[in-house]
Image (tube, rainbow, N blue to C red):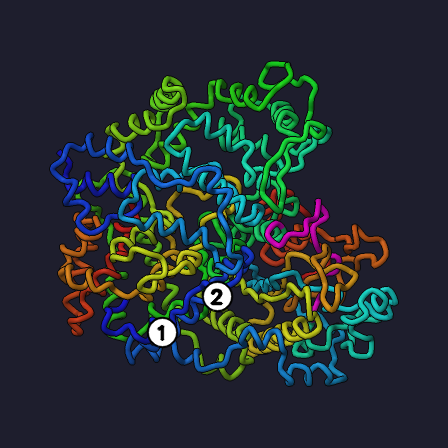
Amino acid sequence: MATQEQAAHLLRRTGFGIGPGQIDRLVARDIHDLIDERIADEGWALSAEEAEDRDFDDNEWDTLGREWIDQMLSPETGLHERMVWFWHGHFTSSKEKATDRLIVRQHHLIRRHCLGNFRDFARDMIVDGAMLRFLDGDGSHGDSPNENFSREFLELFMLGRGNGYTEDDIRAGARILSGWLVDYRTGDVSFDRERSYTRPVSFLGTRKNWTIDGYLDAVLEHPACADHVASRIHAHLVSTPLDDDRRRELGNTLRRNDWEIRPLLAEILHHDDFVEARGRRTRQPIEWFVAAAVAVGIERLGDHGFDLWQIYSSGQIPFYPPNVAGWPDDDRWSSATQVMARGNAILNWQLPEETLNSLAPTRDAVLSHLGIPDVSETTARALDEAIDAQTEYSRGLELLLVTALLSPEFSLV
Amino acid sequence: MTSPTDNSETEAGNESNSEESTASFAELYQGPKQSRRGFLTLAAGAGAAVVGGAAVWSTRSRPSQEAVANPSPQAEAQSTEAAVDMTPQRPLPASADTANRTLVVVELQGGNDGLATLVPREAGTLYDRRESIHIPDEELLDFTNEFGWNPNLAGLAGHGIAAVLGLGTTNDPDGSHFEMEKRWWAGKSSGRDIPFTGFFGRLCDQLATDQPVTGVSLGSNASPALRAENAVTIGLSDVQAGWFLHSDDDFFRNMQRAMAMMASGTDMSPGLDQADATQRVRMAREGLADTLAFGDTLAEMDEDRMAERYPQSELGELFGAAAELIRQESGIRVIHLTHGGFDTHSDQRGTHDYLLTQLGDAMGAFLSDIDDAGFADSTLVCTTSEFGRRLTENAGGSDHGQAGMAMLSGPVNPGVHGEAPSLTNLDDGNLIATVDFEQYYATIAEQWFGIPSSEVLDSGAGPIEGLIAT
């Protein structure tokens, strides 16, 4: 039987926020059934053809970022959307080096694969237009190949830094991956045999003529690969330290299931360490804003004073990762810069009528509503004293909400 | 947050962003174009008492986008005033104690045209290549035999200015704002292995003490240049952005008290006593405490003095706030200001002259203010810009180039430093950098703050000798 805390934890970690009444619908059901339901989440994705046909109105300001935040805000948001966010930080690319046209294709590539098969996912990502642009694969010539993608693919995406590969492997990988071009205007990706490297090279201990599929298989078969990828997913969803045995176990799950992602997620989420991880991860800015907006009852960006610039002022901008490693995932996201940005943003919001009419202006009601019923005594007392001192009764609920949203407890999941 | 009953004014001011055209990363990072409107309307809508906190500054005029594109007659009139002395004066030696020193960085965002800032005299090439944007010798403010300042920098007269010429990356230069900003912010001139931290953030990591905040970026939210590993650095889109931390309104005072209490706690939620959970809560409480401490600093700002001593411009406001932060000796060691709009592809004379007028007037006011307050020997002002502009003009504007220049004032040796880039030996039409910006950064680290270059720069680049006056 899922407790309130377990239900809230599941919603926070496998989605973004907790909407009105969501916990009530989950408590008293079997927690493992709930986890399986989360894993079965299908989510929304455009097909490759649909993504290619996306039209852009050049005058629209960050349409893609808005569209994505709206997806996160949706009451149906679950593990699919959470994994889209995870993979954007893993197989990351930036809009500054890739056009909107390329980024929308990559975004939906992520949407299509994020709960699917990792091998297929990585295969498509190697020749994705946005990735080719972002890590300089575009135009890389076999005679003097660009090593950027080859290096990051092994170091960040697949194996982990220094995990059983050499600088020579990076150079060889760059040759194997050369010859690809991105048409800047149409975004179409093509292969030019003339520009590729056609002679045998030594990569991860084997000398032969390589294809992209052969290259990917060699990387996937590398003993470090499954463990690295699985531990990255574990770090995002669970965030507590992983010992070597467990790391191998997770890697084996991925390998045993022919790189299907869902069985790995089941292995991660059904394990005790997932439930025990409560309160030990700091919400990243986008996660915080989405959770806060959902809690307040805002369902769309642009409604009730919630807008994209508020997220931007936190320094975390979708499709603009700080570097190829994506965003760091640590306790820096509860710093003063964040508190300033958050305070400014939520004081600009207007409380939706439904929330005002349905939520009692009491400490316990507000804390339960935000999914943090069991706060520290200090936080509980701070809220009590604030509401006691508030003479303008009509603004009591706002005061409680604003204060509780800025509490240490709400900054953690 | 407001209730539906009192949101009319807030909503009216909350215009949609959809009117904005596709913006560069740097512009997106600034967001405050919208946020400022929000804060002001909120202040107006949120109750009478808030006005004391925020509206005072809002009464001062700010330049509109149109004003930038069409400089005011005053700006032009000023530029024709003659006989302003900008020649190098006696250097002001820096304070002996590096622990008191503060750095103010002004990022001239968009790529400042070095050739139109400190202009080579009698350079026939410039007349030929820049027919409509070149500033004739007779208009220049005297500096050295070889160079004269853009006349719109007259506001800096009487303050010793040092120029570093030929500044850029000597390591595979790139023409993209994004790429070059990233390198400058990170302090990585090669652009390879860009860390999450920014160069000025790493300086703050070295400079941090038990004071709550070490670095502040104004006018750019949280500038990536100030991202630190451990030090607290705060980004403010606007100097009013912390208004809710020192508003006297009942609502906000209750909120501030609750934040203070939450920050002070040491206890945990029931059932959460693991070490890592405790550490996360502790960091979140520190974030609250730092915010409130900084709010106190913001509350101490003397707005009347700022309004009196500084020009009515956004940059004037930022420089005024910087001076206040320095006067309070609140432990803030690095202040980063953003002055945007230097991407002068068209109408360069109009736009660039206007931006330099704002820079000269605001920075001049700051240097006088800081001097009067007794902080002249412990305050260094320096500029950065992601690149210079191309030598040959393009129909009244200039395209992205490579080598640019920087200006410094405070305890510096006035005059020209570095080496002027060749006007004939070019890289694809671009000036070739003679000084790597990591050397420039190394100078600031080592000679201003006494921090070994190797602590903050992977390359361990050496400083430019003779720039800082000791």
Q: Name above or below for residue A373 compared with residue A124.
A: below
For the residues bearing labels 1 and 2, Cβ distance under 8 angstroms:
no
Residue in the image at 54% along x and 36% along y: A128
User: Is B287 on the left-hand or right-hand side of A279?
Assistant: right
Q: Which mark is residue B19?
A: 2
As helix, strand or loop, the secondary structure at mark 2 comes to helix
Give the residue at mark 1: B12
Residue in the image at 59% along x and 52% along y: B178
Q: Amino acid at mark 2?
A: Glu
As helix, strand or loop, the secondary structure at mark 1 comes to helix
Q: Say if residue A393 shows up in the picture.
A: yes
Real-space CA distance between mark 1 and mark 2, rounded to the nearest whole angstrom: 15 Å
Write down the chain letter for disc 2: B
Q: Name above or below for residue B17 compared with residue A375.
A: below
Q: Amino acid at mark 1?
A: Ala
Q: Quadrant of residue B409?
A: bottom right
Please state which of residues B72 and B250 is positioned toward the viewer in this rendering: B72
Near mark 1 (Cα within 10 A), the count class, few <14, some 14-19 or many ≥20, is few
Near mark 2 (Cα within 10 A), the count class, few <14, some 14-19 or many ≥20, is few
Q: Which mark is residue B192?
A: none
Image spot of residue A394 (x, y percent): 17, 71
- In the rendered structure, which segment of residues is drawn in magenta? B161-179
Q: Are callouts 1 and 2 both on one chain?
A: yes
Residue in the image at 38% along x and 22% along y: A254
